[in-house]
Image (cartoon, coloured by chain):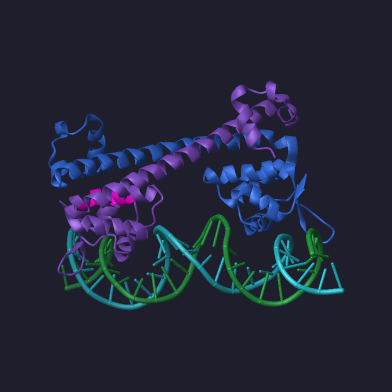
Chain colours: A purple, B blue, C green, D cyan
Amino acid sequence: MTYTIGEMAKLLDVAPSTLRYYDKEGLLPFMERTESGIRIFKDSDYGILKIIHCLKATGMQIKDIKEFINLVMQGDESIDARLELFKKRKAELEKQMADLQETMDTVNFKCWYYETAKKAGTTDVPDNMTDDELPEDMRKIRAKLRK
Amino acid sequence: MTYTIGEMAKLLDVAPSTLRYYDKEGLLPFMERTESGIRIFKDSDYGILKIIHCLKATGMQIKDIKEFINLVMQGDESIDARLELFKKRKAELEKQMADLQETMDTVNFKCWYYETAKKAGTTDVPDNMTDDELPEDMRKIRAKLRK
DNA sequence: TATTGACTTAAAGTTAACTTTAACTTCTAT
DNA sequence: ATAGAAGTTAAAGTTAACTTTAAGTCAATA
């Protein structure tokens, strides 16, 4: 099965101009064209584009994704390098998840803070609570917000 | 306790120019100055700047964080609005975490894929595995990468 | 066959969040 | 008292990842 740029863009939920941009940046060296110059996307391209999307979601830049695509084009001799790349992406993701969890902890604290303030009608109440008056799981987080 | 812009920047691990930018964008309407015009940061400003950082980490834009700061400046009458804002941030974060988990699932699949390819010396082996030959937790993910 | 929608390119424009620069002033330490 | 570090502003520059525009070609349908 093959697709035009518009059809593939719809499958991936991106703009056609995004795919043209990726092509221009060298992310799609496997692209084929009709005689008249129109891009032909294959089923197998869908998976690669999904991986490009995944790598972007790990925080990788276009120019680095291009390097990965170059490894893919080299074939089996680059298996090791590609494995190492994904292991690094995994480590990076774990850091991002930990960061996001810290952010979530702070947001949860603020939800508790404003719920407490709402009940009391003033932020003075949560502001003036001593450490042992506030929920145990809020103590560490509040401490981080103070200097 | 008070701090200069450079001292506060160091505490927060940001550039002084970032704090000046925030001030210019209206994120720090509570800023005080010396007679000669030098910004004076207080201990209480640290917490607000930490919250600004937290809101940024949830994906909020500077102009929307400014709106939040405006709510803070309004005092107790905006408690409800602020609670709702943090509830929305929490929902947004939950979506981000789910997205990040999907990305992690894909990265884990690719790690398995290249480990399998490495053992075999070729990506043909994982490529040609039937669904029941691959680890159960990899099946759904591989299916998503195919069209 | 003619219209219309989708394709093509190169080049310019957009956006957000800073960062840098230049020209200047103020504070700290010897 | 003076050097140098750090503060000030306004304005311009940076960066990444697209998006838009303009001018044109191609493909499908009535």
Q: Is residue D16 left or right of residue B63?
A: left
Q: Quadrant of residue B25?
A: bottom right
Q: Is residue B6 left or right of residue A87?
A: right
Residue A41 coordinates in the image, percent (x, y): 21, 56
Q: Is residue A11 visible?
A: no
- Relative height, residue A124 to residue A147 (above, below): above
- Relative height, residue B29 to residue C9 (above, below): above
Q: Quadrant of residue B146?
A: top left
Residue A20 coordinates in the image, percent (x, y): 31, 62
Query: Could you tell me which residue is drawn at 39 percent across and 56 percent down?
Result: A61
Q: Is residue A131 visible?
A: yes
Residue B51 or residue B113, whichever sits in front: B113
Q: Is residue B69 left or right of residue A47?
A: right
- Relative height, residue D30 to residue B53 (above, below): below
- Relative height, residue B147 to residue D29 (above, below): above
Q: Is residue A58 left or right of residue B28?
A: left
Query: Could you tell me which residue is drawn at 25 percent across and 43 percent down?
Result: B145
Circle count: 0
Magenta stretch encompasses residue A47: yes
The magenta stretch spans which residues?
A45-53
Magenta stretch encompasses residue A18: no
Work out which quarter of the rendered image holds the C terminus of chain A and state it. Answer: top right
Residue A21 coordinates in the image, percent (x, y): 34, 63
Residue B106 or residue B8, whichever sits in front: B8
Residue A124 coordinates in the image, percent (x, y): 75, 30
